[in-house]
Amino acid sequence: MVDQELICKAIHGQNYVRLYYKNHAPNWHIVEPYALGNDHSGKLILAAWEWKGTIGKDSQGIQYYTVDAITEFEIDSAMFDRLQPGYNPADRRFHSVVCDFLTSRYNMRSTGVVPPM
């Protein structure tokens, strides 16, 4: 299982991620990680925007990944600067949130990197 601190580092750094997800073909996914938290059953899940054309994928949008099924997680140096349409920070899938993009936006102000509102 991928360490949640590594996932939060990518979320707070607003870095693209390449992950291997064994529960969904195609298995490699390129995503913008937005939030990490526990669902109502206690499973740790990642909400992320997956790009169209990601290694065989024909559509794009918000996807939810069970962290237990992520076997590889590579943080890219490239960064994203805003949330894509369709992401709901009040998503009811999350019972509790460990870290999220919206919280990290305010932390980035001290670095001078502020995503557009």
Image: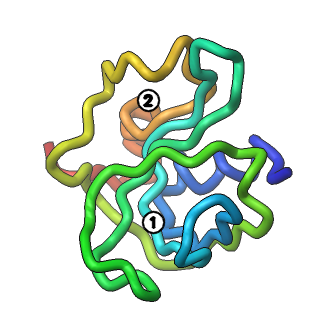
Say which residue label 2 marks. Answer: 103
Question: Callout 2, which amino acid?
Answer: Thr
| Residue drawn at (26%, 31%) of the image | 88
Residue name at image x 68 percent, y 32 percent = 44
Q: Position of residue 17 (x, y in %)?
A: 55, 69
Left or right, residue 89 beside residue 15: left
**Residue type, label 1:** Val
Badge 2 crowding class, 10 Å Cα cut-off, few under 14, some 14 to 19, many 20 or more, is few
N-terminal label among 1 and 2: 1
> Is residue 7 shown above or below 105?
below
Q: Residue at x 32, y 27 (%)?
A: 89
Helix, strand or loop status at disc 1: strand
Residue position for label 1? 31
Q: On residue 83, which mark appears?
A: none
Distance from Cα at disc 1 to Cα at disc 2? 19 Å
Q: Indicate the quadrant where residue 108 lies.
A: top left
Q: Where does the image place residue 78, in percent across and percent down from the top left?
A: 46, 78
